[in-house]
Amino acid sequence: MKIVFDCERMKYPFTGLFEYCHKLGIALSTKGKPDNEVILYLQQKDQYYFDKDLTFINQKSLHKVIFPSFNKEIKLWHTAHQTSWYVPPAGRKVVRVLTVHDLNFVYEEESESKRRKKLKKHQQTLDKADHIIAISEFTKQDILKHLKVDKPITVIYNGCDFEVYPDFDNPVYRPQKHFIFAIGTVIPKKNFHTLPCLLAGNDLELVISGKENSDYVKEILDEAKKQGVETRVHITGPITKEDKYWYYKNCTAFAFPSLAEGFGIPVIEAMNFGKPVFLSTRTSLPEIGGEHAYYFENFNREYMQNVFAKGMEHYLSTNPADKITAHARKFTWEKCAEAHWQLYHSLTGEI
């Protein structure tokens, strides 16, 4: 069976959607052999991320208006993001699958008119699909709550097969002390400005990595200055895979106080190293971290400091690293790809 997997969002590097498309695209192509073939839809400039022997359809902006022709042997087109413009029109004889990652905007501080506009766009995309995939049970419930859905929804968790670089020892910034690590696009919904308070009363540093929003970076640094810890807060900007490996491997703890997540891959990445992870209780994070994480129920400074101190005390006294790692290894791209292929076959009736 031939299917198309839409990797168009790989045009945005250093993002979770880039990693999702890249990792799942590779896993689908590997898991599908020898009886199934994945055709990848993305810009020609980004195709070098994949094996050159794979088959591609070159994505172009014109396809928003005139959808590309494709092989009649293709039975299914999987659109990888809920706001994509690239969904085959109803006249094409192909099963249309859509992945919804989150409805995070409903939790953000936006006007009601902006929320309605975004919900309208999401609804239009969902209406074109024959089947929906949600990346967490939380996302599924959000879809059912905020949108009109008259088609099946299947939950398939993301994977995580973290790449290791054991010989790498030259990070973009080398902390001088033990440190807390955080990673993600540095924007307000990630809530990173709440983290400098965790440096009070100790000698830790805080390293935050990811694509930056300059206004929000200033807010984080201003908060660090209020706490008197500005010299111990370091925002690196985007980092390489080698840097990311080094920071996960060497950090004392990982913190991810995000206000809105459809899944939260960095959580599983940190857990792969057996690290103590400190999360917010918002959206999908308790579902992903489970009983193996520590949680901030609110962002009061003293409360967060108390949660962090007690969490570290518990971690050091119980040594749960093996259990944390075992939990993380439940989430693999191989399992994710296998679940997708099972769904594809059930939708097309082909074995």
Image (cartoon, rainbow, N blue to C red):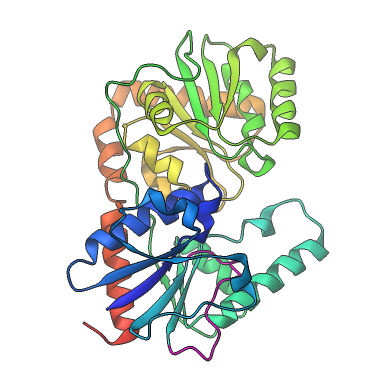
Question: How many callouts does the rendering have?
Answer: 0
Residue 304: quadrant of the picture: top right
Q: Is residue 14 magenta?
A: no
Q: Is residue 88 magenta?
A: yes
Q: Which residue sits at x=57%, y=77%?
A: 126
Q: Between 119 and 129, which is closer to the camera in this rendering?
A: 129
Query: 85 above or below 202?
Result: below
Residue 182 percent location from the top left of the image: 52, 31
Q: Is residue 90 visible?
A: yes
Residue 33: quadrant of the picture: bottom left
Q: Which residue sits at x=33%, y=84%?
A: 73
Residue 2 percent location from the top left of the image: 31, 76
Residue 266 percent location from the top left of the image: 45, 41
Say which quadrant the N terminus sits in: bottom left
Q: Between 66 and 196, which is closer to the camera in this rendering?
A: 66
Q: Point out the stretch of residues depicted in magenta.
A: 80-93
In the picture as drawn, the residue positioned furthest to the left comes out as: 34
Residue 228 percent location from the top left of the image: 69, 11
Q: Is residue 223 left or right of residue 4?
A: right
Q: Between 306 and 170, which is closer to the camera in this rendering?
A: 170
Q: Is residue 62 left or right of residue 287?
A: right
Q: Which residue sits at x=53%, y=15%?
A: 205
Question: Magenta span: helix, strand or loop, mainly?
Answer: loop
Say which quadrant the C terminus sits in: bottom left
Q: Is residue 147 visible?
A: no
Query: 69 above or below 38?
Result: below
Q: Is residue 64 left or right of residue 23?
A: right
